[in-house]
Amino acid sequence: MPKRKVGVVTSDKANKTVTVKITNYVKHPLYKKYIRKMTKVYVHDEKNECKVGEKVLIEETRPLSKLKRWRVLRKMA
């Protein structure tokens, strides 16, 4: 089963590619405080339908280019 994550589109300027920011909360090992970690990934958007600010569900896939390893499954509400 491939990994699936939810993120927010931060850029849609490239053709068939969007940049998605994934936010993850992790607990600090010593201070036990939750810290927000953000990851930026390049995602394949075949139909160029995603716009900046939209929430999307993405899925890990085979390498599509030098940096793209994810594809858009669907847009969330």
Image (cartoon, rainbow, N blue to C red):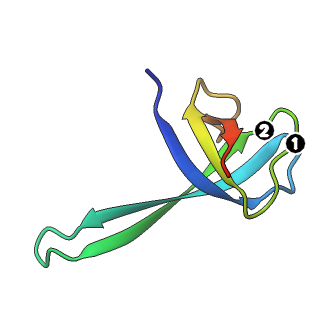
Crowding at label 1, few (<14), some or many (≥20) Cα neighbours within 10 Å?
Answer: some
Q: Is residue 25 left or right of residue 38?
A: left
Q: Does the CB distance between marks 2 and 1 fall below 8 Å?
A: yes
Q: Is residue 43 above or below residue 36?
A: above
Residue 57 numbered mark, or none: none
Counting from the top left corner in percent of width and height, residue 42 is at 66, 47
Counting from the top left corner in percent of width and height, residue 37 is at 41, 66
Q: Is residue 51 left or right of residue 9?
A: right
Q: Quadrant of residue 48?
A: top right
Q: Is residue 75 above or below residue 64?
A: below
Residue sitting farthest toward the left: 30
Residue sitting farthest toward the front: 77
Q: Image point 35% across, 64% down: which residue?
A: 25
Q: Image point 47% across, 25% down: which residue?
A: 2
Counting from the top left corner in percent of width and height, residue 38 is at 48, 64
User: Tag 1, which secondary structure?
Assistant: loop
The quarter of the rendered structure image containing the N terminus is top left
> Residue at label 2?
45
> Residue at label 1?
48
Q: Is residue 23 above or below residue 6?
A: below
Residue sitting farthest toward the top: 1
Q: Quadrant of residue 27?
A: bottom left
Count how many numbered circles sit on residues in the image.
Answer: 2
Measured Cα–Cα span from mark 2 to mark 1: 5 Å
Q: Image point 82% across, 56% down: which residue?
A: 51
Q: Is residue 64 left or right of residue 49?
A: left
Crowding at label 2, few (<14), some or many (≥20) Cα neighbours within 10 Å?
Answer: many
Q: Amino acid at mark 2?
A: Asp
Q: Image point 50% across, 36% down: which residue?
A: 4
Q: Amino acid at mark 1?
A: Asn
User: Tag 2, which secondary structure?
Assistant: loop
